[in-house]
Image: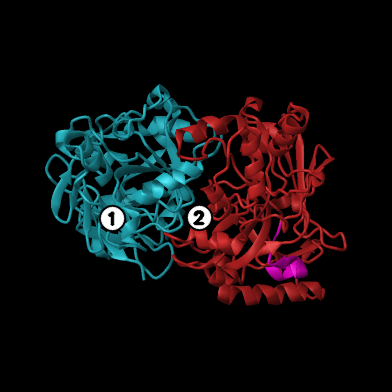
Chain colours: A cyan, B red
Amino acid sequence: MKLATLKSGSRDGQLVVVSRDLSRAVAVPQIAATLQAALDDWSSVAPKLADVAAALERGEAKDSFAFDPKRVMAPLPRAYHWVDGSAYVNHVELVRKARGAQMPESFWTDPLVYQGGSDDFLGARDDAPVPSEEYGIDLEGEIAVITDDVPMGTKRDSAFDHIKLVMLVNDWSLRHLIPGELAKGFGFYQSKPATAFSPVAVTPDELGAAWRDAKVHRPLVVHVNDQPFGQPNAGVDMTFDFARLIEHVTLTRNAEAGTVLGSGTISNYDRSLGSACIAERRTLEQIEQGKAATPFLKFGDTVRIEMFDEQGRSIFGAIDQKVVRLG
Amino acid sequence: MKLATLKSGSRDGQLVVVSRDLSRAVAVPQIAATLQAALDDWSSVAPKLADVAAALERGEAKDSFAFDPKRVMAPLPRAYHWVDGSAYVNHVELVRKARGAQMPESFWTDPLVYQGGSDDFLGARDDAPVPSEEYGIDLEGEIAVITDDVPMGTKRDSAFDHIKLVMLVNDWSLRHLIPGELAKGFGFYQSKPATAFSPVAVTPDELGAAWRDAKVHRPLVVHVNDQPFGQPNAGVDMTFDFARLIEHVTLTRNAEAGTVLGSGTISNYDRSLGSACIAERRTLEQIEQGKAATPFLKFGDTVRIEMFDEQGRSIFGAIDQKVVRLG
């Protein structure tokens, strides 16, 4: 099934079930008012939502209405836990190589993650406000999963069943703030403004054969200002699958229901597929042409991130945002 | 007023108003079921809670009952935003000096913060489960504030009024996981297990003259295994006050209602006052005696963190936890 959260004037919005083709939706207040409420009690709520989804597919859901992606918030408009990995290690290797640094061998076996801000997620069509173009505004196209309660000490083999929903992500980044912040040693904070998510979150079964080994085996299609930018395959060169990432993030902590776990920027060794962030393209330009040519984003620029099934149908709806000046 | 959250079988517990002397409590479901719900609508909810608090002080609150700190969850059992500073820069300077590293001058003017895990906060009397003693288990005694909605771009002068509640914190740390994690460059994750908070959160006015300049001017009294460990004054040597920290954390983001903002380990230049974490004491031992003598914590060890007013009355109740083996 596919789930979305519509703007309703409340902080957590209104949970709706969306049809597979993204054309229709139905509110489910009698089952769960919000997606977090559904996740808090997923094992009993999910079957009821699935019944509604099935009725919607049959054209039998009462009070269904046209689904308008312009009305969405993030599926979880705010979350208690947002942890983003850097699972496409070839991307890290590339970026380090470009600045003449050696990547430690351990990066191939020990996942890299950061704790992100989760109180203010952006909807798929919300503008992305930034105080200054000087900050080096960049997109990062990613996949994220949402889990139920995952106890501390969960191993990879036990982690698969904790993955309940899948989404697309635009992990907005402010590149020129990153070096100073990382040099301080405590990780990203100011350099990571609010993150945006796809209009709908889907259960893994909606992905069919594209969901296997806790990876999404489809290209992520990225456009910048309506021009094709990249379409790396999210299932290729993902060094750590989501089950392995869950093992990593629960070594010393519980991950509570509604934990959002990201893959990091999708990146393939096959560079002909393009990139899912400007920083990577600039790195490739630097290596190949001696000079980064593609500029970071300016106010008014747009970013579109989408994924299609084998029949060319949008799975999650499109993240389609404009960068705007704060205020 | 003073607020607490009692265990009720639900994830967010039950909000109660607690008397100034921490002896009595009263549930307020007619006003707000949970502290997050209160914070979501603070300007209209807070006056109603204050009325209940006043009635409780007069002995006129209906259905009040004895307040039992053993029954508390964290005031916010889960939060959407936990950002912890390192505002006592003398502590950072000391630790760096001990390992022969120079602290950049900018650390005196540019705050250091990290994004913490907020989906699984511990109550003041909850055990602290850790998988292994080999991780170097340590406490960090801190102050935290809770804000209402703070818009992106808020300057220090406008930040004071956004501070709605104050709490004590034990920011549990796994010291032996920190060097490896920080070397990877993305900040703390596995090295920071679930954080614990004091039994009650209080409005700044409850601190009287001890609340000024967005700092708490009282000693934080720390015991380890019932032995005095340190009592540094939280109002002394705090390089960045909470208003300045708010300015820092809202440069590129909104901080939504219920944001928990920590001070970092409290530390005074007057080393006779002791420390609020074992790592600092070990550093001082290293410098003074050539060798760190105080061990990190073992399973069964206890940590007590409390703060008293000028009359010796506990302001927040005590964080009093035992370290236990996971499982």
Category of crowding for the residue at label 1, using alpha-carbon neighbours closer than 10 angstroms: few (below 14), some (14–19), many (at least 20): many
Disc 2: which residue: B80
Closer to the camera in the image, A31 or B315: B315
Query: Which residues fall within the magenta stretch?
Result: B200-212
Query: Could you tell me which residue is drawn at 76 percent across and 65 percent down?
Result: B210
Going by the numbered disc 1, the residue's amino acid type is Pro
As drawn, the residue found furthest toward the top would be A105
Chain of the residue on which disc 1 is drawn: A
Q: Residue B245, how many percent across, how many down?
A: 56, 59
Indicate yes or no whether the magenta region holds residue A68: no
Closer to the camera in the image, A214 or B100: B100
Tell me whether marks 1 and 2 sit on the same chain.
no
Q: Vertically, is A173 above or below A205?
A: below
Q: Vertically, is B33 above or below B90?
A: below
Q: Residue B112, how many percent across, how many down?
A: 54, 50
Q: Vertically, is B320 above or below A238?
A: below
Q: Residue A214, how many percent across, how many down?
A: 33, 32
Q: Residue B98, how many percent across, how many down?
A: 66, 34
Disc 1: which residue: A199
